[in-house]
Amino acid sequence: MRKFGATELGVLLFIYCFCVNMPMAIGQGRILGRVVDELTGKGIPQASIKVVGTSIGTSCDSLGNFVVAVNSDKTNHIEVSAMGYRTYKGGYVASETEVIIKLHPDERVIDAIEISSKRKYNNKNPAVELIEEVIKHKRINRMVRQPKHRFEQYDKIRFGMVDPSSKYLKGLGSMRFFFENIDTVSIPGSKLLALFMKEQISDVYQTNDPVSSKKVVKSVKQTKYDERHINNHNIQSYLTYLFQDVDIYAENIFLINKLFLSPIANNAPVFYKYYIVDTVDVNMKPFVELRFEPRNKTDLLLSGRLWVSLDGRYAVGKARLNTNKEANLNWVNRVDIEQDFTVNEEQQMFLERSDVQILFGTEKKEALFGQKITMNYDFDFKATFSDAVFSGAPIEILPQADSSIAILEERRPIPLNSSESRVYTDVDSLNDNRTFKTLVTLGYLVGQGFYNLGPFELGPVEYLYSSNNIEGNRIRIGGRTTGLFSEKLYIEGYLAYGLRDQSFKYFVKPTIALNGKAVTTFPAHYLQFGVQHDIFDPGRNLGFKKGDSFFQSIRSNKPTKWLDTYAYEAKHLIEFGNHLSIQSGFVHHRRHAIGDLNFISSGDPSVNIEDVNTNELEFVLRWAPNEKFYYRNLVRRTIIEKHPIFNVQYNKGLRGFWGADYNYDALRAAVTKRFFMRQLGFVDVTLSGGKIWGTLPYPLLEIPDVFKNDDRHVIDYSLMRNMEFVADEFVKLSIDHQLEGFILNKIPLVKRLKLRELWGVKMFRGRLTDGNNPYLSSGVVHFDTDNEGNKLTHVMGNQPYWEGKVGIDNILRVFRVEYIRRLNYLDLPNVNKDTYRVSVHLNF
């Protein structure tokens, strides 16, 4: 290959630039003109000029004058538009002679707008027309709709106390230093004490064909408390959930678990009022300043101002948004959002800075604050990168991010103030403080129910004692290992003893990581083994928490039918970056009926089948796109957002070894999703169904769950008795709608209480095939009876089971009261038709 010298290379570059640029220089001219009102002859300020078929455009000055570059070799088609006037199109050639363009007023426009709360608002005014133009142009102005590009992003999240009382400094002794690090700069007039801070630098990649976005976090620095008692991941996840990225062009803005309608949403003019405040120049470009406010300030809407460009793009150049004090928000005094946009060479507006501040507290005083600042910089609008960068999760944290703090220190676009700089070192010092260690140990015991001993922790406390009709008083000692023991091997277990049956029960389950990472790390890959001997009520799953807590033992519908169970299981789980997981496993069960549970053969009433033994292969496919979650050890709790969760499970029964008696197949599927309905709150919907093939005793079939379960796919029924219905073909549905005060907020006086209404229904539709129906088949077992001879289990009729609820939430900000009613199957024995439930809910 020939190598070019410096002189030759310079010549080639000159020729290239000359060939590329000369045609434009040769064919370029300009049009000078003035845009005037056709009726009055007065110049129209800020009218938009656009050369059709090109990206060339400009706007008029305050007198209506303009100059626009055009092709001098042909007729150029000019489009002229202005608020309150009909759009004009005409053909012109380049000329130094001034062109007069007359615009005809649009008869829909009112002559003047008076910004006054005393005057009735009119839907047809220039401000509304302008916002409608903004809405029309949203698609071309959204950042993710622009051609392939990349940029660097800096995020800083802080959370802490506002104006901490001097009382905190008294009696703190050695912890006093932490409460003396006060920030008086960030929020003028307020003193801030940061308890948590996180910074990160990321590379962001975006493309519009198809619309895709990927964020690669390459450097992270955050405060880290003692992991034995405080889960830093959960703090980070919760704050990230509260402070989600704000996209002014999206239909909704999601903050503090609420969905606020954007002031430029497609139907925003139905809910907002708009007023023109002024016309201003920002960076030598004309903008109109708009003020907006809700028509009903008790709804989840925002107030504030928008600066809209008048260059024909109608892009947002600045936004200042805030919540209204009349809105039905809990523990939140105010939310302030500031966004500033910058323009690139193609005159497209891009978000440069976003600042979200939330003040938490009572109506009279702020107690806590949260803030998220995002800076976007180093834009590359001609970036070249492979589409493979978008594979995997939308947000990827590089393994070396925690150890690459030097990148953050070098690339941080906003310097930290003196108070912020101390936060990291102060938290490190606090972790070594003896008084602080004692406080967090007690807090962990109360909050989590475990007492930490370093490599091992004892608990949960609520499982130390319980009672039932078989064991009488039950004593249980349990615990689990922690990261100090090993991050790649996790063990949990318990030993229990019943004083009445004088029998020991036990459970142990080790989990071993297969990917060389911590067991809890996402995406996880591990192997798990389990051995358990305990008594279970029919339908209950194996596990560390199997329903034998103190609170379960004092419920009204305590079980009296039990299965003495020995179980052995082995499972393998692998998760992928797109939150798809595959679990496979083998479980052996040996069940023995005890107490007053009897398995009487349906073919021969004299035969009592005491043991039900099974071998089972299990395969579970789960997909939770964009899932975020809290975790503690292996227990995960999904942070509920708009994304659905899908679950498919297949079980295969294997007869013929280890004493197993049954062949069967079972397929179950479920989907759950939260639907945000803007001003109508949100609805949680769960739909599941399945089918079981094979001839089986009814405890091995589908028995609806009547106990509260944290699994979002599991639907529990409040007024259904344990083992009341059984099926081998079934569908379940749960709808829970929280209106967030949509109705009560509009009732005078009542709205001051900020109450929130809710309603919901649950349905179970089950069918029992003839082969599993003890009234028709001789190969199964009869349904058991109670002490009065009433059947405890029933074959469902043609109608599904329904129960419904209505309730009031946010009573005194913490209480929820629900009325639950059973809607059918009321003629069955010993059923409760309705009940009331009072619970504590802390919601924003």
Image: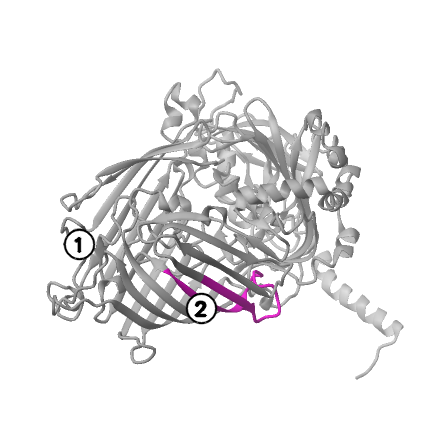
* Residue at position x 69%, y 31% in the image: 187
Q: In front: 813, or 791? A: 791
Question: Overall secondary structure of the magenta stretch?
Answer: strand
Disc 2 designates what residue? Answer: 583
Say which mark, if any, is on residue 785. 1
Res 299 quadrant in image = top left
* Residue at position x 51%, y 30% in the image: 127
**Position of 808 compared to 184: left or right?**
left
> Secondary structure under badge 2?
strand
In the image, is residue 269 above or below residue 250? Answer: above
User: Amino acid under label 2?
Assistant: Gln
**Position of 395 compared to 413: left or right?**
left
**Start and end of the magenta stretch?**
507-534
* Residue at position x 28%, y 47% in the image: 762
Choose mark 2 or mark 1, whichever is in front: 1
Q: How far is mark 2 from mark 1, CA to CA?
A: 38 Å
Residue 800 lies, in percent from the top left, at 20, 51
Q: In front: 712, or 228? A: 228
Q: In front: 185, or 776? A: 776
Is residue 323 in view?
yes
In the image, is residue 451 above or below residue 540? Answer: above
Residue 41 lies, in percent from the top left, at 57, 27
> Secondary structure under badge 1?
loop
Residue 225 lies, in percent from the top left, at 67, 47
Res 370 quadrant in image = top right
Res 33 quadrant in image = top right
